[in-house]
Image: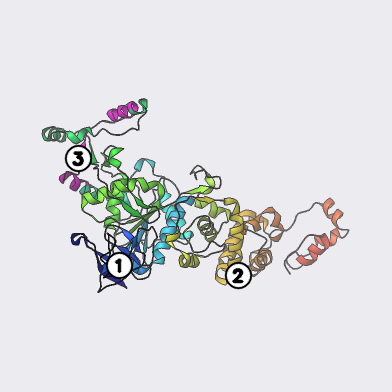
Amino acid sequence: MLLSSFIHCSTPSRCFPIKTCTRCCQYSTGRSVRILDTPVLLKNALTFNRSGGHGGKQQYMRLKSSRKRCFSSECDEVGHQHEHGDVRVRFAPSPTGFLHLGGLRTALYNYIYAKKYGGSFILRMEDTDQSRLVPGAAESIEDMLEWAGIPPDESPRGGGQYGPYLQSQRLSLYSQAADSLVQTGKAYHCFCSQQRLELLKREALRSGQTPRYDNRCRHLRPDQLEEKLDQKVPHVIRFRLESGVEPFNDLVFGWNRHEVAQVEGDPVVLKADGFPTYHLANVVDDHLMKVSHVLRGSEWLISTSKHLLLYRALGWKPPVFGHLPLLLNRDGSKLSKRQGDIYIQSFQRSGALPEALLDITTHCGSGFNSNRVGRKMEELITEFNPSKITTHSALLDLDKLPEFNKIHLQQRIDDAVQRDWLVRDLQVRIQEVYGTQVQDQDVLQPDYITRVLHLRKGHISSVSDLVSSEYSYLWVRPSFSDQQMTALSSETQHIATLDYSGSYHNYCRLTGLPWFIP
């Protein structure tokens, strides 16, 4: 229940309406979110004495500023309210490469947030940088999300009400938005050549300054502009940065504001080829797709003020922003795409279980009520608590992944449905590794593989361990020379006549080989 009230100040003209969450006593004035120290309700009015009292004839309450965040359904309306109705979050990677651990973590937090609050998880491909696109990357990213157990509700493959979900198929929408900005004087045509821009950059670096555009074309006279347009001089559209950026309350980092106009030149929002830059495209798409919450990496925190200026210029209400702390290596170094082993496909090929990957990436970070190993998706959603997300970077120790995988592998083996999946996966791996060496097809039977899984449960970290040379004897007939056989047993000739599939126990007993299958 929300209490709609007024705060009455000692100066009547300074009274203002508030809404109060009855669960945490957090209130909103429309400008900020604070928390009541001791709330007192007087005739549906909360009275606040700024000067210290009015002779004690009335009771007053004290208010104090707080960064505490309540995530009850009531407080959603007070603080980080779901301003577009239903919760809608998005993961918007660029298909200039394949999905890696950092991207998986961002997608996971968005997915969990959506499912926690009964919302939708959107996958959108930001493929506007056509020169750097990697063939097959877009399809692979969606494949890996589905493999990891975080399938999007709307995506390029699955479609949805607000598609298309490839930015390269939405160019007319960005052009319309850019034209609107130009018509209202919020943006302008820039005709500066690449050579001039490069000279500006070199001069700034030579003098020890940060390169920035000097906003030259902002000051073109109307006749100069018309002449260049008539001559079809190549141009881009730049957004006019203005001072006076309003602060915003980030879900993780709290109140933030960056006066971008003081440190940057006017940014390009539409390139000469008709493709938008990230700044315009993500604002247009988030608005048209009715995204309610933007959860992305903290590297975008400093750009958010610029995006809020774009929202204001277009007359649109912005979503709620939350910037997730970085995911780093154990030694604090940055995860790099040059590390081949951070790509999700490499983990999949090595036999890592998706739930183990999700578990280790959340275990090293924050945002959950507990920090135990072995959590499944349902438990991650239940224990998710956005107010517990910290600003500290998460240090990922991949050396611990085998232990996480071992725990989740045991859970799968004990679950009949997931065990069947393991059996099928192992059948494929056996045939890929050993091929024609498998002389007895009985070792590919589900019952046999199931017994192997149960007997080695707790000893292996991955099903791929079972196709290593250490366990080859489970799938192929051991090969010995006559000399080796004679050294092992005097009954060499008898052993050679044994039927492998029917007398494997005797075979192992006579040769002294280890055996596990009863």
Magenta span of residues: 178-203
Q: Give amino acid for label 2.
A: Asp
Mark 2 residue element: helix
Q: CA distance from mark 1 to mark 2?
A: 60 Å
For discs 1 and 3, the disc positioned in front in the rendered view: 1
Say which residue label 1 marks.
60
Seen at 86% across and 53% down, the residue is 487
Q: Which mark is residue 414?
A: 2
Left or right of 336, for residue 56: left
Left or right of 242, for residue 457: right
Q: CA distance from mark 2 to mark 3?
A: 64 Å
For discs 1 and 2, the disc positioned in front in the rendered view: 1
Which tag, 1 or 3, sits closer to the chain's start? 1
Q: Which mark is residue 136?
A: none
Assess whether mark 2 and mark 1 are in contact (beta carbons under 8 angstroms): no
Which tag, 2 or 3, sits closer to the chain's start? 3
